Image: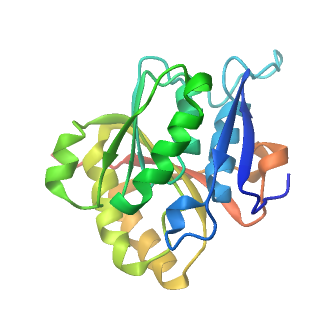
Amino acid sequence: MKFTDSPVIDVSVLDARLSLHQDNGSMHVGTSVWPCCLVLLKFAERWHPLKYSDGETPNPYAQLLDFSNKRGVELGTGCGGAAMGLYLLGLREVILTDIAPVMPALKHNLKRNKQALNKTLKTAQFYWGNEEQMKLLKPPFDFVIAADVVYLEETVAPLIESMEGLVADDGVVLLGYQLRSPEAHKLFWEMCVEVFEVEKIPHEHLHPEYAYEETDVYVFRKKKKNS
């Protein structure tokens, strides 16, 4: 699959189809659909119990991607594709968060996909690191979802603080990642390993049609604190 700057990006999830309307002319990066969103979503779909069909080999992600009866929150959701897709894959509840200027595009896309989702998903304005807004989200969450969110050095610390504050002790952060800024990249990974155990998904395990050479999927789990 080639990534496109077309105004509309369609993506299938199990038996449903999401239609994401992006505005590439906007001043805000959140109104575009970025590749990591699709890479993360299609990885999760590829190994979903309803999709995985190799009876010979056990599914290595069966436990990780068991979304049934789980809560999730997406940081920097933008047009909402990743969170909508993971909801279709079984999340019981998911909250889509972003900054105020992105909310109109997000709500437009949720309305556009209401029939596929069979409901209107919850949204919340959330500026990373804002403790009052974080409390209103009612953590902890089983899944914190984030895709293409590391691009400004000054937002790295509040992003990691938010991930840590929102994810349950036995929960996971699912991260779609692409290097956007060398400075932000360096700081992000230096700070991440202080807080999380980091697992990189082998590239050959990504969906073959949604595996970009420069894009990866990571799983973060909270490090156990010494008692």
User: Where 141 sits versus 117, above or below?
Assistant: below
Q: How many marks?
A: 0
Q: Residue furthest bottom?
A: 183
Q: Residue at x 54, y 60 (%)?
A: 31
Left-right relation of 158 to 108: left
Q: In this view of the protein, can residue 162 be seen by the observer?
A: yes
Residue at 41 percent across and 80 percent down: it is 153
Q: Relative to residue 189, is residue 163 drawn left or right?
A: left
Q: Residue at x 21, y 36 (%)?
A: 138
Instruction: Name the foreground residue: 208 vs 205.
Output: 208
Residue sitting nearer the eye, 224 or 201: 201
Nearer to the camera, 11 or 186: 11
The residue nearer to you, when weighing 160 against 190, is: 160
Q: Position of residue 20 (x, y in %)?
A: 64, 45
Q: Is residue 97 above or below residue 194?
A: above
Q: Position of residue 84 (x, y in %)?
A: 54, 35
In the rendered image, which quarter contains the C terminus?
top left
**Residue 63 visible to the viewer:** no
Could you tell me residue 215's position as x and y percent? 69, 61
Q: Is residue 85 left or right of residue 99?
A: right
- Residue 107, position as x, y percentages in the image: 46, 43
User: Up-down: is 195 above or below 97?
Assistant: below
Vertical placement of 118 versus 155: above or below? above
Identify the residue at image location x=78%, y=53%: 211
Query: How are the residues colored?
Result: rainbow
Q: Quadrant of residue 17?
A: top right
